[in-house]
Amino acid sequence: MSTHTQTNGNAFFACNDVHSYYGESYIVQGVSFEINEGEILALLGRNGAGKTSTLRTIARMDEPELEQGEIWLDGKPLHTMPSHEAAVAGVGLVPEDRRIIQGLTVEENIKLAQIVEPVGWSLEQIYELFPRLGERRKQEGVTLSGGEQQMLAIGRALARDIKLLLLDEPYEGLAPVIVQEIEKTLHYIREQGMTTIIVEQNAVAALKLADRAVILDTGQLVYEGAAKEVLENEQLRHEYLAI
Ligand SMILES: Nc1ncnc2c1ncn2[C@@H]1O[C@H](COP(=O)(O)OP(=O)(O)O)[C@@H](O)[C@H]1O
Ligand SMILES: [Mg+2]
């Protein structure tokens, strides 16, 4: 036997016993899961369960601080990297507040992302996916509607050559018709082989899109399995998802 244990595994993406803190607050409490290449994982749980904190830990943001555990993406140890290196290694976080940069047009927002090598989708590909962005390419990004800003945030993530797309509540605050529009594009992005984690309060919508699901409760994993199973498991839905 080699000293090389389960830590790296063969999975395209793996979190292994990940613990993280905001200051003294112990939030992500030993989370482990794996994702195969091209899969969509729904990361679910009640408000405050630790979903955003888990995404931020994976993206190696300064907070919460990773205290213990390993995070592997396509053979690369994200746990050893600061945020900007994790980004170069292929993590694309679309944060809940979208973070569109003020004073820049739609196109400038995307081009700014492409300053970071390696470049992913071209402007043309992004506008083909989101025609509304193409129509508004010269408009200041922050003046877009909520749905368009979400499209821009996703387009901007794809503009870098990412291997893992992290979506934090992409449907939040959006009208059902816009949710459907974005859902369609996420299906297309999946067809292109993108590996994705989607966090959503709208668990049903996330589960329809996802292959597998994990459920968090107070920073710990309480379920891991097929997305379809969660939809069919009333107890699970009641206890952790309130749906
Ligand atoms: N910046 C922060 N400082 C301290 N505690 C935080 C911070 N952000 C979130 N928390 C706490 O971490 C826990 C998990 O939050 P979060 O990851 O945002 O949950 P979710 O995304 O599942 O709603 C909550 O108890 C929340 O209060
Ligand atoms: Mg959150």
Image (tube, helix red, strand yellow):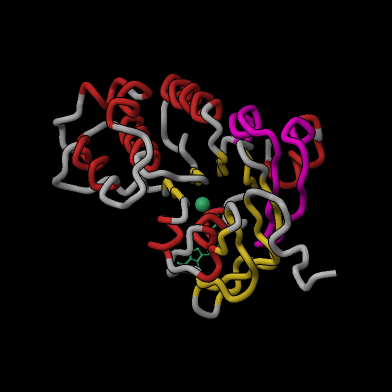
| Image x and y of residue 206, in percent | 60, 34
**Location of residue 36 with respect to 145 vertically, above or below:** below
In the rendered picture of this protein, how many numbered marks are placed on residues? 0
- Let me know if residue 33 is in the magenta part: no
Quarter-wise, where is residue 234 in the image? top right
- Let me know if residue 222 is in the magenta part: yes
- Name the residue at 54% across, 59% down: 58
In the displayed orientation, state which residue is furthest to the bottom: 24
Q: On the rendered image, what quadrant is the C terminus found in?
A: top right
- Name the residue at 29% across, 47% down: 113
Quarter-wise, where is residue 121 in the image? top left
Image position of 94 (left or right of 197): left
| Image x and y of residue 82, in percent | 43, 68
Look at the image and give the residue range highlighted in magenta. 203-231
| Image x and y of residue 181, in percent | 44, 21
Quarter-wise, where is residue 18 in the image? bottom right
Q: On the rendered image, what quadrant is the N terminus found in?
A: bottom right
- Name the residue at 14% across, 46% down: 103
Image position of 101 (left or right of 43): left
**Location of residue 153 with respect to 83 vertically, above or below:** above
